[in-house]
Image (cartoon, rainbow, N blue to C red):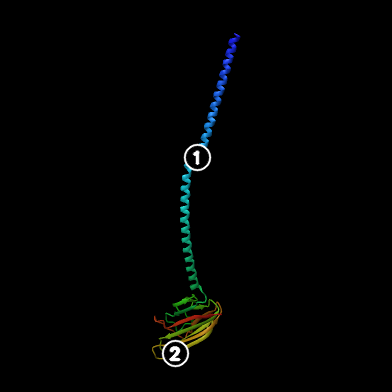
Amino acid sequence: MMRRAAVVLALLLCLQWTWAQTDGENKNAEVLFESRSAEATPDQSRTNVTPDIWAKLKELRHKMEKLEQENAALKAKMSSSVNEVEEMKRVTADPTKVAFTASLAIDVGPGTDATLRFLRVLTNIGQAYNPDTGIFTAPVSGAYYFRFTLWNRRTESHVGASLHHNHKSMMNNSDFNDYIAYVSLSNGIVLHLEEGDEVSMTIDSQYSISDTGDNRTTFSGFLLFPL
């Protein structure tokens, strides 16, 4: 009995050792397989991803080049527009360029004391003359030249008007139409105006003034030079 028990025990020990060795080999094989799989995965991923990255980079570079070209074109267009706007401002808003001519366009008087409004504006560089009020306002201080021509077709009537600087009469001219078709008169003056000073023409109640589409009665002025 003792001998049989020893033999069985020896067999059990041999089997246990064999199972342990086999299990270890299996675990080593699994670890080796996982290791090789991990090493192989980056290469395969790199192989699959790299062409996509290069394609995206190429596409982005193409888009950036296109945007740079469009940006350069917009800058050139904007620069041209800015130059045009500045030139328009210089021409239209330059206070040293002032000149106007306007005709009366209607018949006025007698029996009217008023500021003459020359309604038909022929020239108004600098927009210093206001046809709604008949008043010229100096945009800058300087020497200005003003001239007027009056025409009257009413027989046996007086034609006349006064030129005022800030409501002060500087000239008063008149004539009488005595049995002729018409009468006209003209005069001019140089005035030293400060910025904001006003110049206008007025008519007294004893005078009458006429005009036609030929602009026979006019009021003009322009800046000689700034001071």
Residue 187 versus residue 166: which sits nearer the camera?
A: 187
Residue located beneath label 1 in the image: 43
Q: Position of residue 153 (x, y in %)?
A: 40, 86
Q: Amino acid at mark 1?
A: Asp
Q: Secondary structure at mark 1?
A: helix
Please identify the residue farthest to the top as the structure is shown. Answer: 1
Residue located beneath label 2 in the image: 176
Location of residue 47 with respect to 25 vertically, above or below: below
Q: Position of residue 31 (x, y in %)?
A: 54, 31
Circle 1: is it few (<14), some (14-19), or many (20+) Cα within 10 Å? few
Residue 164 versus residue 35: which sits nearer the camera?
A: 35
Q: Position of residue 116 (x, y in %)?
A: 47, 80
**Which residue is pictured at 58% across the width and 15% down the height?**
10
Circle 2: is it few (<14), some (14-19), or many (20+) Cα within 10 Å? some
In the picture, the disc for residue 175 is none
**On-image quarter of the C terminus:** bottom right
Q: Amino acid at mark 2?
A: Phe
**Which residue is pictured at 45% across the width and 89% down the height?**
175
**What is the spatial separation of the Cα atoms under label 2 and label 1, in whole angstroms?**
114 Å
